[in-house]
Image: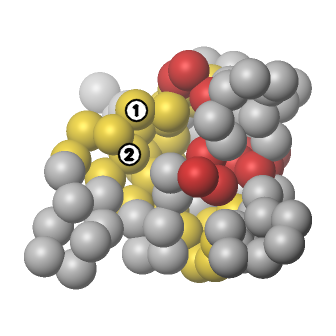
Amino acid sequence: MAFTPATLQRIGGQNDNGNSLWLYKTADTLATVDGSGYFSTAAAGVVSAAAKLKVGDFILAYTTTGPAAGISVVQSNTRDLTATPPVSGVVDTFNFTAVATVDSD
């Protein structure tokens, strides 16, 4: 599948360092979400995640496929508005760490 901008929501405001906490819900697996450039894609007329995500932002991803959830940090974002023409940017995250994947009761 592909990145769905409407399901990326800021759930924590920027802290003193300018970083945010994001929640993302998808039918994609964590392995897919973890791919370089996954968050860079945007539908026509929709602001891309590259315009929102900053290096150091945390992303909590909830997937409807296994594993159920994961957490990562934005490693890089090559977006550059000072370039002519502006560069839309490629977002790369560190590998997602799966959480809440075992229920032993």
Identify the residue under disc 1.
Answer: 9
- Mark 1 lies on a secondary structure that is strand
Indicate the quadrant where residue 17 lies: bottom left
76 lies above or below 28: below
Camera-side residue: 30 or 86? 86
Q: Amino acid at mark 1?
A: Gln
Which residue lies at the image location 30% right of the left edge and 58% below the top edge?
20
Camera-side residue: 94 or 5? 5
Which residue lies at the image location 67% right of the left edge and 41% below the top edge?
48
- Res 22 label: 2
Camera-side residue: 39 or 97? 39
| Quarter containing the C terminus | top left
Q: Is residue 42 visible?
A: yes
Which mark sits nearer the N-terminus, 2 or 1?
Answer: 1
Proximity of marks 2 and 1: CB atoms separated by less than 8 Å: yes
**C-alpha span from label 2 to label 1:** 6 Å
Indicate the quadrant where residue 94 lies: bottom right
Q: Amino acid at mark 2?
A: Trp
- Res 59 label: none
